[in-house]
Image (tube, grey):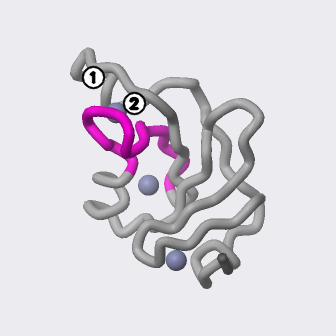
Amino acid sequence: MTACEHIQAIGSVKTAKSYECEECVKIGSSWVHLRTCQRCGGTRCCDNSPNRHASGHARATDHPVISSAEPGESWLYCYPDDAFAES
Ligand SMILES: [Zn+2]
Ligand SMILES: [Zn+2]
Ligand SMILES: [Zn+2]
C-alpha cells in the first residue's frame, strides 16, 4: 500500500492529548481503539467502536488523515483514499 498526498503532506504526527474519545466522554459511551485527527489534533474512537467517532469526524469536517493513538502503534490512515502508512 502506498501513502496518498494527504499522508505525504504530514510533517510531524500529532499525538493524543488525552487517551480518551472526546465525543464518547460527552455522551458517556465507551470505545475500542483511539485515533487522532491529523488536521485538528482531536482524539476519537475507531470503526470497531459503537459510535465510530473518528470516521464520522473525518466525513463531517473533511479532515482525512488519522493516526493510531494506541500505545506502541505508529501508523497513519487516510479515510477518503483508504491509504495506510507506517509513521
Ligand atoms: Zn488521502
Ligand atoms: Zn467515540
Ligand atoms: Zn479533525
Instruction: Look at label 1 and name its amino acid.
Output: Lys
Q: Which mark is residue 6?
A: none
Residue 1 percent across, percent down from the top left:
66, 76
Looking at the rendering, the stretch of residues picked out in magenta corresponds to 40-54
Q: Which residue corresponds to the image point at 61% horizontal and 38% vertical from the top-left?
A: 69
Q: Which mark, residue 22?
A: 2
Q: Is 46 a magenta residue?
A: yes
Q: Is residue 74 above or below residue 58?
A: above
Position of 72 compared to 68: left or right? right
> Residue at the spot x=52%, y=43% of the render?
35
- Confirm or deny contact between disc 1 and disc 2 (CB under 8 A): yes
Label 1 crowd (10 A; few <14 / some 14-19 / many >=20): few
Q: Is residue 53 magenta?
A: yes
**Residue 73, quarter of picture:** top right
Closer to the camera in the image, 42 or 75:
75
Mark 2 and ligand 2: say if the CB distance to the nearest ligand atom is below 8 Å.
Answer: yes
Write the residue at 57% across / 25% down.
Answer: 18
Predominant SS along the magenta part: loop
Pointer 1 residue: 26
Asked where in the image residue 24 lies, by quadrant, the reply is: top left
| Coordinates of residue 30 in the picture (x, y in percent) | 34, 20
The x and y percentages for residue 58 are 37, 60
Between residue 18 and residue 5, name the one nearer to us.
5
Q: Secondary structure at mark 1?
A: helix
* Relative to 9, residue 66 above or below: above
Q: Nearer the viewer, residue 13 or 2?
A: 2
Assign a secondary structure to mark 2. helix
